[in-house]
Image (cartoon, rainbow, N blue to C red):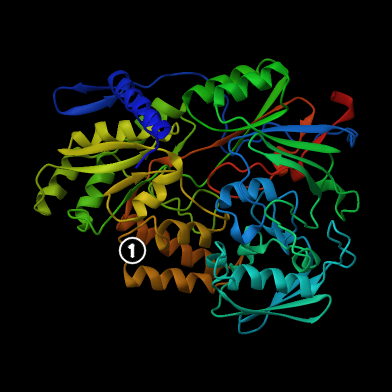
């Protein structure tokens, strides 16, 4: 049952849905719903870097004030209830063996080199020397093994699922870590870049330190204070990579309301804000960028704003019905109405630039006649179903437009406005036929995207044995190889020919910064939802 506050929000969301439906869609010739596109001019975001690290001396005495959406939950990686919050608040504190760069390449961190054995079942990593935790203790192979075992084997660990490819971890000497795998999985490296790979101090564990409140890592910053309004950090002066901690002080400030975030940017009370795009955000982003005081950066994401379908609930157990829903959607209309044509339509699970994206798999065109024919072939008459829809924009409005377009083929989607927190577990319970929510991906590699999209609880109906085998086989292919590319292209084609859910378009993320704050182009993508990663930012003296 929703709390009183949550219920009030749901009621408000229902009013918003009614307003959007009334103002953005209308019936034409009595048989088709068309979207009223709002033609606002805005800079091109996806794939376009609008600002970067420019020439100038870095001011290492500067402070970074970064506006973020949610408060911290827990700083002890295996037990943090929200991986989304963990990444944002713990990335400055903890190191991992490897990291990902802005192009999703695996790059060194605590590990300086690594290699797989000939059979792909053993991963050997060499550690950087002289790395210390903030409590002064040494980060060596034993500390790495202890952290990984804690995450993988503690029965209360919430991240152990990310290390399922690994069997055991060994420390043959202080500078070498040997990771034994259960299966061939070259992409297992990506799991080591996330919260599951964060390394905590063994001394802190021995001393009984409550890491959830007082984290002890070896990262570029240390935690000063934390609470419902955010967190404050100070620079770790002994950190081995000075490019990752170029501020003396950093604050992650909770500003959940996007309009409030914009207002704080305009008034100079924060320096950088991260946003998920919708029509109003794109318009205001342009206004700020053209003021001469701010710069905007667009970052493509893997979030296709999907309608997940529970194929265990008839008639969605019939592939023809799932395809009919996909053919009922006018993705270009959704894009133009809500995202100013900045959200590239898609009907395949892997975004442009990722391993396995296939340009030949063009987005399904809206075809009402064919969709109706498929429903008739499936023996399905007009029907209705309930769908949980997150109240966050632009997904809330996407749900409204989907509802309108489904009605053209005799399908009624009953929207159940739902807060972001409970929506995923509610859908995974199996009681609801559909759900529209942000894609939940822990790392940007194709394996993580496919696993999160098809092999996790967000697809209660599961996949065919053939699809599951293809997914497992793809993991064995070496990173960067032609074989890996071909394997994931085959998976994309299988998903395209037999859609398990309805995708719309690749939602961009937007970072807006006061002039002089640079480094957004170097910030890696970490998840489907925007993650604040402060490690690549700096402030230039010349423009302070």
Q: Quadrant of residue 35?
A: top left
Q: Nearer the viewer, residue 209 or 530?
A: 209
Asked which secondary structure carries label 1, the reply is loop
| Residue designated by label 1 | 462
Estimate the x, y position of residue 160 in percent, counting from the top left: 56, 67
**For residue 63, side relative to residue 27 (left or right):** right
| Quarter of the figure with the C terminus | top right
Estimate the x, y position of residue 261 in percent, counting from the top left: 61, 25
Estimate the x, y position of residue 504 in percent, counting from the top left: 38, 41
- Compared to residue 443, the image places residue 268 above or below, namely above
| Quarter of the figure with the N terminus | top left
Mark 1 is surrounded, within 10 Å at the Cα level, by few (under 14), some (14 to 19) or many (20 or more) other residues, namely: some
- How many marks on residues? 1
Residue situated furthest front in the rendering:
208
Q: Nearer the viewer, residue 249 or 4?
A: 4
Q: Residue at x 81, y 70 (%)?
A: 127
Can residue 194 be seen here?
no
Q: Residue at x 32, y 20 (%)?
A: 19
Q: Residue at x 13, y 46 (%)?
A: 373
Estimate the x, y position of residue 7 in percent, counting from the top left: 37, 32
**For residue 404, side relative to residue 522 (left or right):** left
Q: Quadrant of residue 176?
A: bottom right
Can residue 161 be seen here?
yes
**For residue 242, side relative to residue 214 (left or right):** right
Q: Quadrant of residue 209?
A: bottom right
């Amino acid at each position: 049952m929703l709390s009183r506050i949550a219920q009030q929000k749901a009621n408000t969301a229902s009013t918003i849905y009614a307003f959007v439906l009334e103002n953005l869609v209308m019936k034409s010739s009595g048989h088709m719903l068309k979207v009223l596109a709002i033609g606002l001019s805005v800079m091109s975001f996806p794939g376009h870097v609008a600002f970067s690290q420019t020439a100038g001396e870095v001011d290492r005495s500067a402070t970074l004030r970064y506006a973020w959406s949610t408060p911290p939950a827990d700083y002890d990686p295996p037990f943090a209830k929200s991986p989304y919050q963990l990444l944002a608040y713990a990335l400055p504190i903890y190191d991992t063996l490897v990291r990902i760069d802005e192009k999703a390449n695996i790059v060194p961190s605590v590990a300086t080199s690594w290699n797989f054995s000939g059979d792909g079942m053993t991963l050997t990593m060499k550690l950087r020397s002289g790395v210390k935790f903030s409590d002064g203790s040494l980060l060596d192979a034993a500390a790495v093994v202890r952290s990984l075992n804690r995450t993988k084997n503690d029965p209360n660990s919430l991240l152990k699922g990310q290390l399922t490819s690994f069997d055991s971890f060994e420390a043959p000497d202080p500078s070498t870590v040997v990771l034994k795998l259960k299966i061939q999985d070259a992409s297992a490296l990506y799991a080591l870049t996330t919260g599951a790979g964060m390394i905590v101090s063994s001394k802190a564990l021995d001393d009984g330190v409550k890491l959830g409140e007082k984290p002890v890592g070896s990262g570029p910053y240390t935690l000063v204070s934390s609470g419902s309004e955010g967190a404050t950090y100070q620079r770790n002066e002994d950190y081995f990579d000075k490019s990752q901690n170029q501020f003396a002080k950093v604050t992650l400030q909770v500003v959940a309301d996007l309009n409030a975030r914009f207002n704080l940017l305009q008034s100079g009370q924060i320096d950088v804000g991260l946003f998920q795009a919708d029509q109003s955000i794109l318009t205001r982003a342009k206004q700020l960028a053209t003021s001469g005081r701010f710069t905007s950066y667009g970052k493509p994401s893997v979030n296709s704003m999907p309608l997940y379908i529970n194929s265990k609930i008839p008639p969605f157990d019939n592939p023809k019905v799932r395809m009919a829903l996909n053919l009922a959607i006018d993705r270009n209309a959704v894009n133009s109405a809500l995202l100013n044509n900045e959200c590239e339509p898609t009907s395949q699970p892997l975004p442009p630039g990722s391993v396995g994206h296939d340009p030949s798999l063009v987005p399904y065109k809206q075809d009402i006649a064919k969709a109706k024919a498929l429903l008739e072939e499936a023996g399905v008459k007009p029907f209705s179903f309930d769908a949980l829809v997150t109240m966050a924009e632009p997904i809330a409005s996407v749900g409204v437009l989907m509802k309108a377009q489904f009605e053209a083929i005799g399908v009624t989607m009953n929207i159940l406005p739902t807060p972001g927190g409970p929506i995923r577990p509610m859908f995974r319970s199996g009681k609801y036929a559909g759900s529209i929510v942000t894609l939940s991906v822990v790392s940007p590699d194709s394996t993580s995207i496919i696993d999160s999209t098809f092999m996790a609880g967000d697809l209660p109906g599961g996949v065919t044995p053939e699809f599951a085998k293809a997914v497992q086989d793809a993991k064995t292919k070496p990173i960067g190889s032609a074989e890996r590319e071909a394997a994931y292209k085959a998976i994309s084609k299988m998903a395209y020919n037999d859609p398990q859910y309805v995708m719309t378009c690749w939602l961009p993320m937007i970072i807006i910064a006061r002039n002089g704050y640079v480094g957004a182009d170097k910030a890696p993508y970490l998840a489907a939802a925007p993650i604040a990663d402060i490690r690549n930012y700096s402030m230039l003296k010349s423009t302070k």
